């Protein structure tokens, strides 16, 4: 079965404000992902600018079918 990561996050912007996500899910290529890699992935995938601190909370690896199609297809 495919692996996904389920987590909450908080992102602060250097020019003020921020965003939060609860019970966010992302497909994993392997069995685990570090908080640093996950933060980088979120920022790049959402194309966020002026990002300051990123906090990952309540991270769990779950067995669940991937939702995105592979990018190499």
Image (cartoon, rainbow, N blue to C red):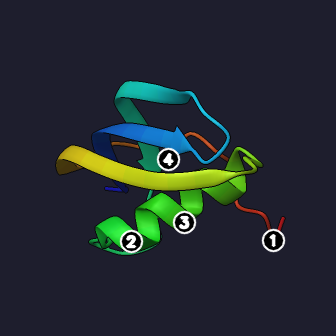
Residue 40 image position (x, y, % from top left): 54, 66
Distance of label 4 from label 2 (alpha carbons): 21 Å
Quadrant in which residue 25 is drawn = top left
Distance of label 2 from label 3 (alpha carbons): 6 Å
Q: Residues within 10 Å of mark 1 (few under 14, many from 20)?
A: few
- Where does label 2 land, which residue? 36
- Where does label 4 land, which residue? 66
Residue drawn at x 42%, y 52% is 54
Distance of label 4 from label 1 (alpha carbons): 15 Å
Q: Secondary structure at mark 3?
A: helix
Distance of label 3 from label 4 (alpha carbons): 20 Å
Residue 64 image position (x, y, % from top left): 32, 42
Dot 2 or dot 1: first in sequence order is 2
Q: Is residue 28 left or right of residue 57?
A: right
- Where does label 1 land, which residue? 72
* For the residues bearing labels 3 and 4, Cβ distance under 8 angstroms: no
Distance of label 3 from label 1 (alpha carbons): 21 Å
Q: Is residue 26 visible?
A: yes
Q: Residues within 10 Å of mark 3 (few under 14, many from 20)?
A: few
Dot 3 or dot 4: first in sequence order is 3
Frontmost residue, 41 versus 51:
51
- Of marks 3 and 1, the one in the foreground: 3
Residue drawn at x 30%, y 73% is 34
* For the residues bearing labels 2 and 3, Cβ distance under 8 angstroms: yes
Q: Secondary structure at mark 1?
A: loop
Q: Residue furthest right?
A: 73
Q: Secondary structure at mark 4?
A: loop
- Where does label 3 land, which residue? 40
Seen in the picture, residue 35 relative to 57 is either above or below; the reply is below
């Amino acid at each position: 079965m495919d692996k996904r990561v389920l987590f909450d996050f908080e992102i602060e912007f250097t020019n003020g404000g921020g965003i939060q996500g609860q019970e966010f899910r992302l497909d994993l290529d392997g069995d685990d992902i570090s908080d640093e890699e996950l933060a980088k992935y979120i920022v790049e995938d959402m194309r966020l600018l002026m990002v300051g601190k990123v906090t990952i909370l309540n991270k769990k690896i779950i067995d669940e079918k991937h939702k995105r199609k592979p990018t190499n297809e």
